[in-house]
Image (tube, grey):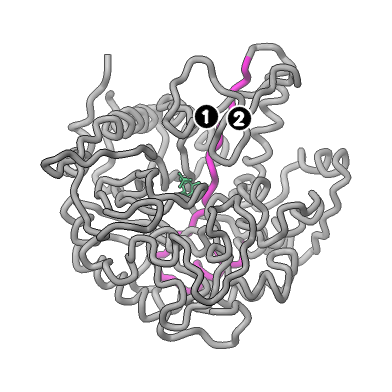
Amino acid sequence: MNGKFPHDFLWGGAVAANQVEGAYLTDGKGLSTSDLQPQGIFGAITPRHEGDSGIKDLAIDFYHRYPQDIALFAEMGFKCLRTSIAWARIFPQGDEETPNEAGLAFYDRLFDEMAKYGIQPLITLSHYEMPYGLTQKYGGWGSRATIGFFERYARTVFERYKHKVKHWLTFNEINMSLHAPFTGVGLPADSDKSAIYQAIHHQLVASARAVKACHELVPGGKIGNMLLGGILYPLSCKPEDLLETQRQNRDWLFFGDVQARGAYPAYMQRFFRENGIQVAITEEDRQALRETIDFISFSYYMSGCVTADPEQYETARGNILDMVPNPHLASSEWGWQIDPIGLRYLLNVLYDRYQKPLFIVENGLGAKDRVEADGSINDDYRINYLNDHLVQVAEAIDDGVEVMGYTSWGPIDLVSASKAEMSKRYGFIYVDRDDAGNGSLERRRKKSFYWYRDVIHSNGNSLKQKG
Ligand code: BG6
């Protein structure tokens, strides 16, 4: 491992409002789409009745316990914390003229607490949620009107926090709308491809408008996109497999191409034509899309394979994307295949393609942890996973890739997005809460807490290259 992490590398962790905050109706917050998905991001839309409760309603109570949690992040030496703003705290229904002051004040307190320790916020404007009111009244991102509501929200938070937050992201895993349309764009799960791509188009325009607004309003601000980095390999070297892999990688790279290059890539014309997809794109939209992001951010948990042979196609239990399992890789307890070298490969692919700085804003291992009789949690499996991935980040830096930072997913245990469970833990900090919602919510340092603290303090020099 020759690659050295830059001296200003942004080490830290990443969470999302709906997976940690709880307080789902506190201080004037409106219902968000996430509140209607108690079973997780692929779950059915479930109407809320008074007295109902779901695991996310309280989550890990970050809304009230953030000072303690930020202090623990500071103890590990975090330079950066990624979280999101719950849009429905700021505009409870989504279409109000004026924002909810109590919601804005919460994030002021949160950012001030981070500033006490010199932790820089990296803020996602929309992480798997939007005000539910916008889906009811307007059909979510299916409506052009939602672009304007989002821009108003983005301008409001840029103006409010412009001196506190310098790094922003637009939509979390924007390519995920292809797999979970309600979560991504507020459309019913059975929407047809034209409707989904039209909604995606509106979201891409909104993202570009937010980029423009950030550049206008936030002095020295930088804004990126956020992709689910689901890199795919051909299952064999058959040319048909290779071509199919290229096609499927373009399904998600398309989003980055629009956001980083400022226009629809040529290959989409044939894709739309052959799939009978109609998308209304105005000249004004094309102008708006020209405002491109400053950096690329992405999540990386695993890679997958592709075959052109339907006989061989076997669905792996994967994160969002239906991937063919790689026979050379082991899997996590949730069937996510572990591939540290894939992270180096992905960093190189993205850097070759876009020539923009990259930010790894999610990576981590979801695992069941055991609390020993003496209270310790010896999560060597998590340490190994993270160590091996970070070694590959160093290799990519040595390859010449510009990497701004690394925020591991879930530095504190939180509610999982796909299954809305607590038992899938990612944290360096254990939270005493189970899938049924029982537990004291007490925080406890795991073995990985001390390991990550050393990694940050040594700026990566404590990482271990494996033979
Ligand atoms: C990413 C999401 O897809 O993966 C996070 O941006 C999510 O919100 C993370 O939590 C891990 O997925 P899961 O289902 O294990 O929580």
Instruction: Indicate if the residue with disc 1 has its beta carbon within 8 Å of ligand 1.
Output: no
Measured along the vertical axis of the image, is residue 73 above or below residue 5?
below
The answer, for residue 454, to whether it is visible in the render is: no
Which one is in front, 194 or 374?
374
Q: Are marks 2 and 1 in contact (CB under 8 Å)?
A: yes
Residue farthest to the left? 374
Q: Residues within 10 Å of mark 2 (few under 14, many from 20)?
A: many
Measured along the vertical axis of the image, is residue 274 above or below residue 239?
below
Which one is in front, 229 or 319?
319
Instruction: Report the side of 442 relative to 398 (left or right).
Output: left
Instruction: Indicate if the residue with disc 2 has its beta carbon within 8 Å of ligand 1.
Output: no
Indicate the secondary structure of the residue bearing disc 2: loop
Q: Amino acid at mark 1?
A: Ser
**Quadrant of res 284:** bottom right
Q: Position of residue 197 (x, y in %)?
A: 75, 53
Instruction: Report the side of 104 relative to 95 (left or right).
Output: left
Q: Quadrant of the N terminus?
A: top left
Q: Position of residue 226 (x, y in %)?
A: 52, 50
Q: Residue at x 53, y 15 (%)?
A: 327
For disc 1, the marked residue is 303
Instruction: Report the side of 201 relative to 34 (left or right).
Output: right
Which one is in front, 348 or 410?
410
Measured along the vertical axis of the image, is residue 261 above or below residue 16?
above
Indicate the secondary structure of the residue bearing disc 1: loop
Q: Position of residue 411 (x, y in %)?
A: 31, 49
Q: Amino acid at mark 2?
A: Met
Q: Residue at x 52, y 29 (%)?
A: 303
- Whether the magenta-drawn stretch holds residue 430 is answered as no
The answer, for residue 117, to whether it is visible in the render is: yes
Q: Earlier in the sequence, mark 2 or mark 1?
A: 1
For disc 2, the marked residue is 323
Range drawn in magenta: 208-235
